[in-house]
Image (spheres, rainbow, N blue to C red):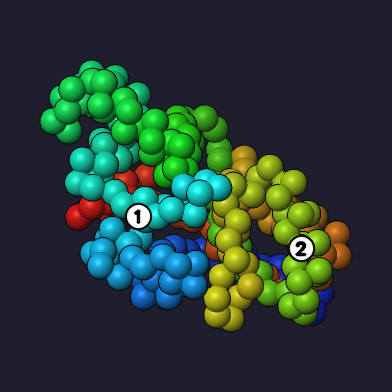
Amino acid sequence: MHRGNRRRPQVCQTVRTGSDLPPCPDRLNSDWKKQGLDIGWLTCCQRSLVAIRAGLGIAMKLDRIDLKILRQLQTDGRISNVHLADAVGLSPSPCLARIKRLQKAGIIVGYEAQFDLEKLGNFITAYVQVILKNHRRAEAQRFEKAIIRIREVVEFHMVNGKYDYLMKIVAPGYDCPARVMEDIWQADLGIQSYSVFIVSGMPIRNRPLPIGF
């Protein structure tokens, strides 16, 4: 569904997906060199997993045990510390210490349950690409603050290229994503146009991140 020039939106039965890529390691290294940090000696994967300890400005390097812990927690967030320690080749005490260190560094930010939407009701997933009329920061912030308050928007990304934002809407009922976008359009948030793509299938669902491979 595309919206622009006040034309009535039409629903497209296609899904266009992209990938959320991490920052380019070379650019990441360049940015952090300005802060007196050098991560050029890390591997590409390690560079993407470097974290800055909150308030300290110190680069944290993840070793292979840290990466194994993260992979295990991605697969089973409810795994006990005893079983996790056994899986990564540690005793329980140092394993728990590593988990706390990863949490303090902001690498592990939380644990959550995943649901089968088909068993919860007639939920529809849609992706929305949005172009704003202008790119003044004040207008962008006004748009962002409004979108953040909409509970049906479960993901919200600022993107490069033709479009300015990519949103993921999950809502009950086939027409609900269109109604959500109609309300946003009528709120006069500075949108020039938007396109809605209804998800008709998910060949890949909740795949763990390729950490440490």
Disc 2 from disc 1: Cα separation: 29 Å
**Residue 141 in which image quadrant:** bottom right
Regarding residue 7, the answer to whether it shows in the image is no
Q: Is residue 110 left or right of residue 203?
A: right
Q: Inspect this view and state whether residue 90 appears.
A: yes
Task: Please tell me whether mark 2 or mark 1 is closer to you in this view.
Answer: 1
**Against 182, is 97 above or below?**
above
Q: Position of residue 78 (x, y in %)?
A: 35, 24
Disc 2: which residue: 141
Mark with earlier residue (2, 1): 1
Residue 99, above or below 191: above
For label 1, the SS is loop
Looking at this rendering, what residue extends furthest in the left direction?
89
Numbered marks: total: 2
* Residue beneath the point at 36% across and 75% down: 26
**Pointer 1 residue:** 49
Element under label 2? helix
The relative height of residue 168 versus residue 88 in the rendered view (above or below) is: below
| Quadrant for the C terminus in the image | bottom left
Seen at 80% across and 69% down, the residue is 139
Residue at image point 78% right, 76% down: 136
Q: Which mark is residue 84?
A: none
Query: In the shown orientation, is residue 137 left or right of residue 161?
Result: right
When the figure is inspected, residue 123 is found, relative to residue 11, above or below; the finding is above
